[in-house]
Image (tube, rainbow, N blue to C red):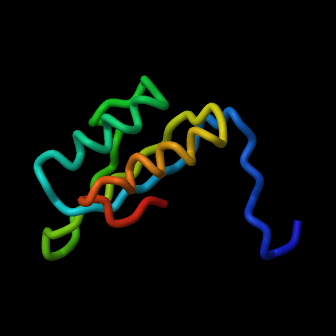
């Protein structure tokens, strides 16, 4: 592996870190949870680490979850990015 190659993820992955940044909205957390729980049924809204921006306009939700297949990552990223409140998925 060279310095420019991303580390290879082995699936299933029990400790995949995902961060979703979006507009602060009373339903944003519920939406993110509803998408991610489709791929890891163990997640609850309490599973998320939440950080709110200084001005309160944005919040980031971070969680470690189980991902069974690489195709699930693609699918969950597409589902999250389809929502107008979502600004970034890492």
Outermost residue to the top: 41
Q: Measured from the top left, where is residue 43 in percent x and y?
A: 39, 30
Outermost residue to the right: 1
Q: Looking at the image, is 6 positioned above or below residue 3?
A: above
Residue drawn where x is 48% and y is 51% of the image: 77
Residue drawn where x is 22% and y is 39% of the image: 30
Q: Measured from the top left, where is residue 48 in percent x and y?
A: 34, 44
Outermost residue to the left: 26
Residue drawn where x is 13% and y is 55% of the image: 25
Q: Measured from the top left, where is residue 85 in percent x and y?
A: 24, 59
Query: Is 24 on the left-hand or right-hand side of 77?
Result: left
Which of the 4 image quarters holds residue 57? bottom left
Q: Looking at the image, is 5 positioned above or below residue 17?
A: below
Residue drawn where x is 21% and y is 63% of the image: 23
Outermost residue to the front: 82
Q: Measured from the top left, where is residue 15 in percent x and y?
A: 58, 40
In-front residue for pair 74/39: 74
């Amino acid at each position: 592996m060279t310095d420019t190659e991303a580390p290879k993820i082995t699936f299933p992955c029990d400790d995949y870190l995902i961060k979703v940044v979006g507009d602060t909205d009373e339903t944003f957390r519920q939406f993110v949870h509803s998408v991610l729980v489709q791929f890891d049924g163990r997640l609850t809204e309490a599973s998320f680490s939440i950080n709110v921006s200084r001005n309160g306009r944005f919040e980031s939700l971070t969680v470690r979850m189980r991902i069974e297949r690489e195709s699930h990552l693609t699918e969950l990223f597409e589902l999250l990015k389809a929502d107008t409140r979502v600004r970034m998925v890492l």
